[in-house]
Image (cartoon, rainbow, N blue to C red):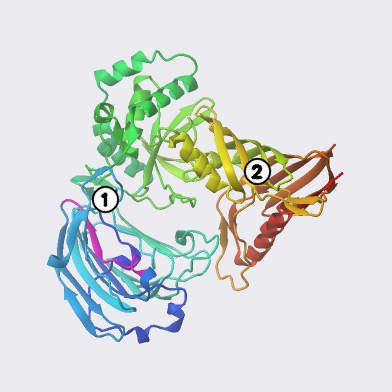
Amino acid sequence: MMKILVLGALSTASLYFAQSYPASAIPENLKKNADVVIRKNFTTVQINKIDEIKYQYNTVTTILNKDGIGKAMVFIPYGKGDNISDIKATIYDEKGNKIKSFSKSDFFDVSNNSQSSFYSDNRVMVLPYTSLQYPYTVDFSYSITNENTVFIPDFTPFSLKNISLEESQFRVINKSGIALRSKIYPSLYGYTSVMEAGTNDDKTYIYKNVPAIDEVSLLPNPVKILPKVSFALSKFNLEGKKGNINSWKEFGMWYYNSILQPVSISTPTIKADVVSLNLQGSVEDKIKKLYQHMQSKTRYIFVALGIGGWQPMLPEEVQRKGYGDCKGLTNYMKTLLDEAGISSYYCVINSNPSEISFDPEFPKMGGNHVILAVPTENGTIWLENTSQQIAFNHLSFSTTNRNVLAIKDSGIEFIQTPDYTAEQNKEVQVLKVKINEDNSLEGQGKFSYAGAQYDFNLGYVSLAPKERDEMLKKQLSSVDFDKIEMKNFVNDRDKASLEFSMDFRALNFSKKTGDNLIFRAVPFLDHNVYKTDEKRELPFEISLSFSDQYEIEFLAPKNYKIEEVPEDFNLNSEFGEYQIKFLKEGPNLKVLRNIKINKGVYTKEKYNSYINFRKKIQSVDNSKILISKI
């Protein structure tokens, strides 16, 4: 959607003096956990007028190992109307000796296509260079001039893990006479801070000596750890459409009138399509029928054409072609609702597994996804319009519990998306397991998933039966299956639940010791490996609350009896709850297991407590049951 991108290690500004940057000059603390070290990262942003902004980038990056190649690629993203100049790249070896220089003619110019099928005005120039020797250093600079002044990027130390920074400067020179707002968001965890210098019309922001964020377990998104500086002009231009952004209200009115209204056009064909559905019942019934009708007629394809990739396709075009991106499909669904006399709001959101919201105190262009909010007397109905399989009034885990920008003719309204509880993000397993004397087992199972656990299993919908069996076999790989068959698969798009049953047989489940058989209490174990970390440096995030409910009935072989079972066990902590019960029923045994995990960002001091909580649960799940021959 956004044409001008500044991607931490990949984009920087004007080169003030030449250096060779030997790798030996990198401070030792910046080598720790780093695949890439940004030696210098200078960006100069010069705002000349409402429709002219010039970026000068210079980055000097040392790639320490092969894992750093993808984090320090030399490329220039751009869009229609961008003017790129002064492209230079020089490669240095470990000692700082020059290997080779490159110019614009050495770059490949390709479509910026990260998906198999989409339409976009966006392109990228890429330098196809990889060294066989590490470390090596790339000194890369270019300038780009653009008419779109609404997209001044945030200034952060870097955006990826395992990258460290010696020095980064972001200089903003404002010659436009237009007020430029800025806001510093400090690191919530004191990871580093930004320095300021200069005046309002010529200001420089600086980061120095920022160590790499290591790829460790349960690490929060770097955006939650690092500081940033945000910028926004009070007057801006987007593809010839000028607007004001002194307030969210003002910006929302511009968005509604300039972006949405020109493409909020119905047609006789769309009107007839809605009439043909013969909508009956409650408002909720009508919305559901229209939504599932839209799902049956369309498919998702990413489209970044038009006004900066921000304006949706016309509803008539989506209707005729049967595809669109989140913007086009949401606008089309809104048009269907309009024809049915039902109001709805086009909502811009930050879609991310981490919960990222807009700042109500700092209006600026943002967001990376669009959904629809439909107010009713019984509450807001939320529609995710890019999936043909997802349930009605269900948002995926990447869009829950954050605010959206609801675009109205009166301006922007902040609306909070729903937050699913642990009880709503639920898995239920009911297993009937027959233990055989040859150490194998066989049985049947019933599974159901709701909330975010519905999202995680929605991939089964598009698979053929044999593919589902293979996927299920991998998912339950703690058991050595020689047969597994998924049956009675149902994706309930009314209730946002997914259910199936399965028949299975597995080898080597139990162990024979004399006339006894020993097997674990929970057949399908947690795959995660939990390790304590005495040197944990950062907080950890449990990104999802969830609950699992298991009922497992073990059937002993003929002439065997239940000899020993573990004791019932309960465990409670701030991270969640766990209970397991063992009920003897004649020659058989029933195991009842319940677990609930609480999401949240927790301090580093609590990390080992959480790990020990999960390790204890794993240990109890792996408790042994002994049955003896009569």
Circle 2 sits on which residue?
Answer: 548
**Picture quadrant where residue 370 is located:** top left
Regarding residue 498, the answer to whether it shows in the image is no
Of the two numbered discs 2 and 1 on the same chain, state the one appearing first in sequence: 1
The secondary structure making up most of the magenta span is loop
Front residue (pair 611, 435): 435
10 Å neighbourhood of mark 1: few (<14), some, or many (≥20)? some
Q: What percent of the width, then of the height, locates residue 95?
A: 30, 86
CA distance separating discs 2 and 1: 39 Å
Front residue (pair 309, 503): 503
Q: What percent of the width, then of the height, locates residue 384?
A: 42, 36
Regarding residue 555, the answer to whether it shows in the image is yes
10 Å neighbourhood of mark 2: few (<14), some, or many (≥20)? some
- 153 displayed left or right of 18: right
Q: Is residue 574 magenta?
A: no
Q: Amino acid at mark 1?
A: Asn
Q: Secondary structure at mark 1?
A: loop
Q: Secondary structure at mark 2?
A: strand
Q: Is residue 96 above or below residue 12?
A: below
Q: Is residue 95 above or below residue 215?
A: below
Q: What percent of the width, then of the height, locates residue 303?
A: 27, 42
**Picture quadrant where residue 194 is located:** bottom left
Q: Is residue 483 above or below residue 543?
A: above
Circle 1 sits on which residue?
Answer: 113
Front residue (pair 327, 256): 327
Q: Are marks 2 and 1 in contact (CB under 8 Å)?
A: no
Q: Residue at x 44, y 20 (%)?
A: 286
Q: Residue at x 61, y 69 (%)?
A: 533
Q: Residue at x 46, y 40 (%)?
A: 467
User: What range is drawn magenta here?
Assistant: 68-80
